[in-house]
Image: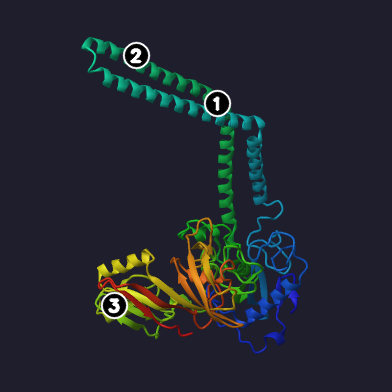
Amino acid sequence: MPYDSQNKVTYYAEASVQGIALPERFTFPFYYEPHPLAEIAAEELKHYLETQTDLDHNFGIIPGAEGLVIGKMFGVLVVQDAEGKLGYLSGFSGKLAGSNDHPGFVPPVFDMLEENSFFLKEQYILNSINDRVSEIESDENYKNLRQEFALLSAESEAEITALKAKLKSNKDERKKLREEERPLLSEKHFARLEAYLVRHSLNDRHQSRMLAAYWKQRLDEVQSQLSAYDLEIESLRKERAEKSAALQQQLFEQYVFLNKDKKEKSLHAIFSTTVFGKPPAAAGECATPKLLQYAFLNGYKPLAMAEFWWGAPPKSEVRSHGQFYPACTGKCKPILAHMLEGMALDDDPFLLNRGEGRELEIVYEDESFVVVNKPAELLSVPGIQVYDSVYARLKGMWGGIEPLIIHRLDMSTSGLLVVAKVKEVHEHIQKQFLKRSVTKRYTALLSKPIEGIEGEISLPLRGDLDNRPRQLVCFEFGKPAVTKWKVVEKDERMTRIHFWPLTGRTHQLRMHAAHELGLNAPIVGDDLYGTASDRLCLHAAFLKFIHPVTGKTVKFEVKESF
């Protein structure tokens, strides 16, 4: 395909796009199947990445390659120029090979690394402040004073503690002596004893005050010498914080985004009305905003977009080499809401009721609770945009009586769900879930064969704040998540497996299946951590718990339909 280096656009060869209809509306960036034109562009870009020798960047694909392994999100934007010719733009998120700008890729919205930029000048000042702080903290006299202060503090604490113990012992002895001598001595002689004991008590207090004063004086002498250093360090850190905040604000104002009508909006203005209040780190550096910005600046009409991951996955996320992914929600959604304003977009699938027309099967019902077999894509409880749900349907069946949801299943997961009819039953069964005394077994179909027959996965999880509702593996802040598993059957393509979740974290089974530290085999149809298909092949097949009224163990099982 011919590449126009001056305008950074690659034009399609007529033969490669013959018979492919232009998209009627622009891609909905947060859930999409790539348009054929975007797929062609992505394949061309992938081929370049596989064969290029220009980029000094270790994607983690070539074993033994030098440098830090950093996978990267790339994007393509299908465009039409002013003459109606079809082409595409290429972009990447963040920096590539330590630089913001490379031939063949659109530039950043604002290049903070440009020579003599205010960012680099301010960064130099910040670095010089950091260097001065490090210089003070490395000063031998300062380190010796800190060590001396620490040793004196420990010594003073030990001496004062020892004296307190001795004085307490003295006090106990005086008390004992009073109790023993009171019945034996006359009033006159006991008064003399009491006066003697009081003098000893006063002497003990004097010793305590003298020791405390001695150590305070010694510590104050060292502390006064340390303070000169500490005050300078504190002043430098305050200056650094103020300059850093000012630099961040200046950066936010430099990132100015356009839409098709050339209406401008800064990063600060875009995020000021969101729950964040201010832009998150690296906002504006993702591929799609950079691609759209270049298109609007240069008179190209955007037709479709697609993003794919290239390289080894990050340790915390599930990312597969070469696979397409939607734009992130935390950083990109507010920006793209402005940039795509006034453009006709593909339907937002999150506004559609994907459970419509799917039957809710009643598996068991009595006066206490009902067990249903939830179909895939039906919500457990009403969502922000869609009311239809297990809750809504049961409420309709029960003539408006409030269904009490005890636990939930992901919208895309099918299977057994227990719903209480009365408050006492709800509390009783919910306590069983909280105590983890309920036995839950899921069946899943994994997208490839795995090694081993059975095992246990323990990977802590937390929400991805920049890309909800995705989850991350996080050993620092994640909540414990444990899953037992056992293979049912497998062939050369897939694995059927049973899961027993011992905890109930969001997307636990999906993450434990897909993550490289788990089974490294996404569940078939997982549109978040794998590849979308007709459905997510995950089914809550078995439940066992204590009936809240009869006290007997009840079991329910419904076989998966995949």
Residue at the spot of label 3: 395
Instruction: Give the image's coloring scheme.
Output: rainbow
492, above or below 271, in the image? below
Cβ atoms at labels 2 and 3 below 8 Å apart: no
- The three-letter code of the residue at mark 3 reads Lys
Residue furthest out toward the front: 184
Q: Residue at x 28, y 10 (%)?
A: 192
467, above or below 418, in the image? above
Q: CA distance from mark 2 to mark 3?
A: 83 Å
Query: Mark 2 or 3, which is nearer the eye?
Result: 2
Mark 1 / mark 2, whichever is N-terminal: 2
Query: Residue 115 vs residue 23: left or right?
Result: right
Query: Mark 1 or 2, which is nearer the eye?
Result: 2
- The three-letter code of the residue at mark 2 reads Arg
Q: Residue at x 25, y 10 (%)?
A: 189
Question: Residue 557 location in percent, x, y?
Answer: 39, 80
Q: Quadrant of the image for the N terminus?
A: bottom right
Residue at the spot of label 2: 199
- Label 2 residue SS: helix
- Label 1 residue SS: helix
Residue at the spot of label 1: 224
404, above or below 476, in the image? below
Mark 2 / mark 3, whichever is N-terminal: 2
- Label 3 residue SS: helix
Question: Residue 498 location in percent, x, y?
Answer: 49, 76
State which quadrant residue 150 falls in.
top right
Query: In the depicted view, which residue is nearer to us: 156 or 291?
Result: 156
Q: CA distance from mark 3 to mark 1?
A: 72 Å
Mark 3 / mark 1, whichever is N-terminal: 1
Query: In the depicted view, which residue is nearer to us: 387 or 417?
Result: 417
Q: CA distance from mark 1 to mark 2?
A: 37 Å
